[in-house]
Image (cartoon, grey):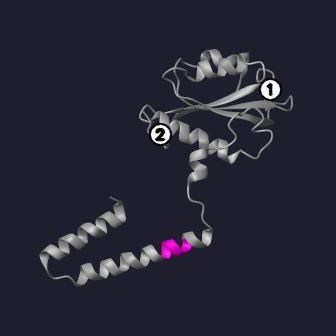
C-alpha cells in the first residue's frame, strides 16, 4: 500500500456531479465543497459553500443529500468535492479545517452564498500581529537559544550540563 504524502487527508474526489453522492460510503468524515458550474465545458466552477461531515451522526453522504433537499440550497450547486480525513483526525480537527476554509472565503460573496457561518470565531480570537512583530519574536528567540547554547558549551558541572541540555531539548522540540 502506498504511503500518503498527506497527514490529514486520506483521499479525495473533486468536481463530482450531484448524482454521484450515492457512491459516497455512509459516515465518511471530512470537508466538502459545493460548486456551481458556470460554463458547459465543465472547467469553470464557483465555490458556493464549504462544510464538514464529522461522520458519527451525519457523514458526507447524509450532509450532501440534506443540501440537495434544502430549499434554499438545492438549486444553487451542481457539483461537489470531498476530502476524506484519516481515522485518527478528531472531530475538533475536522471543525478547525472547515473553519479555516470558511475564514479564507469569508469575504467572497460567491463562496459564501450558502454558508450560514461566514467566519471561524476561534481563528478570530487568535492573536493577530503585524508581520514585523513575527520577525522581532523570531530574532528574540534565536538570541535566547544561542545564549543557552553558549551556557551549555561552557558548563563544566555534570548536573548543570544535563539541566541545560534538557532546556535546549525543550527549546527545540517543545515541552
- Compared to 156, does 42 lie above or below? above
- Compared to 69, does 34 lie above or below? below
- Percent x, y of residue 39: 86, 32
Q: Residues within 10 Å of mark 2 (few under 14, many from 20)?
A: few
Residue to which mark 2 is pinned: 4
In the displayed image of the protein, which residue is found farthest to the left? 158
Q: Is residue 100 visible?
A: yes
Query: How many numbered callouts?
Result: 2
Helix, strand or loop for the magenta stretch, by majority: helix
Q: With 41 as the anchor, is 5 left or right in this view?
A: left
Q: Nearer the viewer, residue 41 or 20?
A: 20
- Percent x, y of residue 30: 55, 31
Determine the image quadrant of residue 132.
bottom right
Q: With 172 as the anchor, is 85 left or right in this view?
A: right
- Percent x, y of residue 97: 56, 41
Foreground label between 2 and 1: 1
Task: Mark 2 or mark 1: name the one nearer the start of the chain.
Answer: 2
Name which residue lies at 77% across and 18% down: 71
Name which residue lies at 67% across and 18% down: 66
Name which residue lies at 80% across and 38% down: 110
- Percent x, y of residue 4: 47, 39
Residue to which mark 1 is pinned: 76
Q: With 94 as the anchor, is 45 left or right in this view?
A: right
The quadrant in which the N terminus is found is top left
- Compared to 162, does 79 lie above or below? above
Span shown in magenta: 135-139
Amino acid at each position: 500500500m502506498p504511503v500518503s504524502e498527506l497527514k490529514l487527508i486520506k483521499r479525495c474526489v473533486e468536481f463530482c456531479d450531484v448524482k454521484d453522492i450515492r457512491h459516497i460510503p455512509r459516515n465518511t468524515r471530512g470537508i466538502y465543497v459545493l460548486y456551481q458550474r458556470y460554463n458547459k465545458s465543465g472547467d469553470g466552477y464557483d465555490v458556493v459553500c464549504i462544510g464538514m461531515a464529522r461522520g458519527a451522526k451525519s457523514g458526507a453522504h447524509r450532509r450532501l443529500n440534506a443540501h440537495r433537499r434544502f430549499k434554499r440550497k438545492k438549486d444553487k450547486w451542481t457539483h461537489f468535492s470531498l476530502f476524506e480525513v484519516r481515522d485518527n483526525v478528531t472531530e475538533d480537527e475536522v471543525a478547525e479545517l472547515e473553519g479555516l476554509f470558511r475564514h479564507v472565503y469569508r469575504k467572497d460573496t460567491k463562496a459564501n452564498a450558502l454558508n450560514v457561518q461566514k467566519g471561524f470565531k476561534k481563528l478570530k480570537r487568535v492573536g493577530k500581529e503585524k508581520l514585523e512583530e513575527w520577525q522581532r519574536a523570531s530574532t528574540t528567540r534565536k538570541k535566547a537559544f544561542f545564549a543557552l547554547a553558549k551556557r551549555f558549551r561552557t558548563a563544566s558541572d555534570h548536573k548543570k550540563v544535563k539541566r541545560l541540555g534538557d532546556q535546549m531539548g525543550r527549546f527545540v522540540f517543545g515541552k
